[in-house]
């Protein structure tokens, strides 16, 4: 039988095809089809896996796994490229493996669900339809396949074989909020089902394990409250279809607020707080907390009217939802900061995804703080007090602003004065670290690709700190450190060491060489910034 022919087998037979491709070092595209499910394509180069495409939720699969990768900031700020696969590689190779695992998992699941049958055909690389991209790293499929099979077995063990994580949960019938008031996790999970998130995306959104999210929704799916759809729907479509179902019920869900004296909402001397959230229930709950605490409030649900409404009402503090239709919270925040009359108004981001990824993005767009949903009255009150309590008289405000501007200017001078040298033979690491340090701290960042280049650069531009890779050709990080410490003019420069998990130098040796901090790859940029800050602080106290 020719390898170009369409073949219909069970999934375990396709494993033989993978082995055949590897054994013969074949290059080309393996197209796999299961019934009416969108087909998948696995791209091979010389017997190794170069990439994947197709299936359900293909675009979001890339974005979701980039969010799971170690680089903790917006993709478009990391790499200026229109090639999604190139962005993918630059962010983190680990994300590629995760995406491949998802595809293999879906192939296993849908083939099992459709009678354990699938069809596939191999298109050699000479075929004009090949999708292989040279920018992608080449991976061995067997280790990824083994890991995927283990994940599938765990899925089976938990009784979830009927429920595909790539499908989109859709609310189907009316429910009462009281039906799940004792299960806050389920209540919050249901409130975020908007037709646009697959089970996998919901798990990422709530920072929970996929299995835990699926098990939490199991009863709702079996009862018919939720169906799993092959087709993504927008939030508006989902809400139009559901109508007065769960969304209107959630608008009636109330939270307990400490009872205090309510303030007159029309008193213009009292600070005004804006609540920008497309959910009316969220605004109502926030309003209760705000008014009970002695402040005025107003809400904006229509994304088109956000900026005009804020300009008109001139709030003293803004609570801004992260996930909204039309524009997300980051985009709104950037627009607010570009509006002269709103540029200094404190902005607090509200989100159900309390993760480092969002926290770093929050800092980039100019927000002042970050609070998690569901709303906790104590957190809201504490935040309000931080920015608005005992608001000083206008003259005092002017003095404080002037002082703050002087301090900020001094801090800017200090930050600009700081110079960090990044030494790493991986160009992607150098670019990402440089961008992180510059955008997060405003530091002057120098980059070189080898230890010798680093020593030469230090002679020209004395750095305040060094970020150093351990594993480099010619002169590794440890050899560089020995040369650095042997020179009286450079021996006190703080060094932060980058190392792969598989290789960690002896701690005593690191201490001897004056390494102040060690950070493992893959790493979160915000962690690296903190390590450098700590090293600089410690170094200044020692000098």
Image: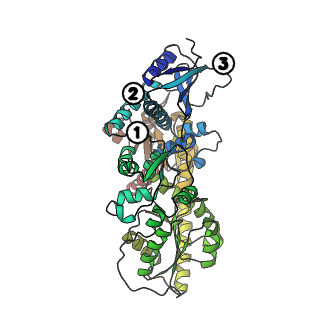
Label 3 element class: loop
Mark 3 = which residue? 126
Label 2 and label 1: CA atoms lie apart by: 21 Å
Image spot of residue 162 (x, y percent)? 40, 39
Mark 2 = which residue? 146
Of the numbered discs in the image, which one, if any, rests on residue 162?
1
N-term mark: 1 or 3:
3
Q: In this view, does 541 lie to the left or right of 45?
A: left
Q: How many marks?
A: 3
Give the label, 1 or 3, closer to the camera. 1
Residue shown at 65%/42% (left/top)?
Answer: 82
Image spot of residue 237 (x, y percent)? 57, 56
Of the numbered discs in the image, which one, if any, rests on residue 140?
none
Label 1 and label 3: CA atoms lie apart by: 39 Å
Label 1 element class: loop
Label 2 element class: helix
Give the label, 2 or 1, closer to the camera. 1
N-term mark: 2 or 1:
2
**Mark 3 neighbour density, 10 Å: few (under 14) some (14–19) many (20 or more):** few
Image spot of residue 334 (x, y percent)? 60, 62
Q: Is residue 389 left or right of residue 506?
A: right
User: In terms of depth relative to the viewer, which is nearer, 348 or 460?
Assistant: 348
**Mark 2 neighbour density, 10 Å: few (under 14) some (14–19) many (20 or more):** few
């Amino acid at each position: 039988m020719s390898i170009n022919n369409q073949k219909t087998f069970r999934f375990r037979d396709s494993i033989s095809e993978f082995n055949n491709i590897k054994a013969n070092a074949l290059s080309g595209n393996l197209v796999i089809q299961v019934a009416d499910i969108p087909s998948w394509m696995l791209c091979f180069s010389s017997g190794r896996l170069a990439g994947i495409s197709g299936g359900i939720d293909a675009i979001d699969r890339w974005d979701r796994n980039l969010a799971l990768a170690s680089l903790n900031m917006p993709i478009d700020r990391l790499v200026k490229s229109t090639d999604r696969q190139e962005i993918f590689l630059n962010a983190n190779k680990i994300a590629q493996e995760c995406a491949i695992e998802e595809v293999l998992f879906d192939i296993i699941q849908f083939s099992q669900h459709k009678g354990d049958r699938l069809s596939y055909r191999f298109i050699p690389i000479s075929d004009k339809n090949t999708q292989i991209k040279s920018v992608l790293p080449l991976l061995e499929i067997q280790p990824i396949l083994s890991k995927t099979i283990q994940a599938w077995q765990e899925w089976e063990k938990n009784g979830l074989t009927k429920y595909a994580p790539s499908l989109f949960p859709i609310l189907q019938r009316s429910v009462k909020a009281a039906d799940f008031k004792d299960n806050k996790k389920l209540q919050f999970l249901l409130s975020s089902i908007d037709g646009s998130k697959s089970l996998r995306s919901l798990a990422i959104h709530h920072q929970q394990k996929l299995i835990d999210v699926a098990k939490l929704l199991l009863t709702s799916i079996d009862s018919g409250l939720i169906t799993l759809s092959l087709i993504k729907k927008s939030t508006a479509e989902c809400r139009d279809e559901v109508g007065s179902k769960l969304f209107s019920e959630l608008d009636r869900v109330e939270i307990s607020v400490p009872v205090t004296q309510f303030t007159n909402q029309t008193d213009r001397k009292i600070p005004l707080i804006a609540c920008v959230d497309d959910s009316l229930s969220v605004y109502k709950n926030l309003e209760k907390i705000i008014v009970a605490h002695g402040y005025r409030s107003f809400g904006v649900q229509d994304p088109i009217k956000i900026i005009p409404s804020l300009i008109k009402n001139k709030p003293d503090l803004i609570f801004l939802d992260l996930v909204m239709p039309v524009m997300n919270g980051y985009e709104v925040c950037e627009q607010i900061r570009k509006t002269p009359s709103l540029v200094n108004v404190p902005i607090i981001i509200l989100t159900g995804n309390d993760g480092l990824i969002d926290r770093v993005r929050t800092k980039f767009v100019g927000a002042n703080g970050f609070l998690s949903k569901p709303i906790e009255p104590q957190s809201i009150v504490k935040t309000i007090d931080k920015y608005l309590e005992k608001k000083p008289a206008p003259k005092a405000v002017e003095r404080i602003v002037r002082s703050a501007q002087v301090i900020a200017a001094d801090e800017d001078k200090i930050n600009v004065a700081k110079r960090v040298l990044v030494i790493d033979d991986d160009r992607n690491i150098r670019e990402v670290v440089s961008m992180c340090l510059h955008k997060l701290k405003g530091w002057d960042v120098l980059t070189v690709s080898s230890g010798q280049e680093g020593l030469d650069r230090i002679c020209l531009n004395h750095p305040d700190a060094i970020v150093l890779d351990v594993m480099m050709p010619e002169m590794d990080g440890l050899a560089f450190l020995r040369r650095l410490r042997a020179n009286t003019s450079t021996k006190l420069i703080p060094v932060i060491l980058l190392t792969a998990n598989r290789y960690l130098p002896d701690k005593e040796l690191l201490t001897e060489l004056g390494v102040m901090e060690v950070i493992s790859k893959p790493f979160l940029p915000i962690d690296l910034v903190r390590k450098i800050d700590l090293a600089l602080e410690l170094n200044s106290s020692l000098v």
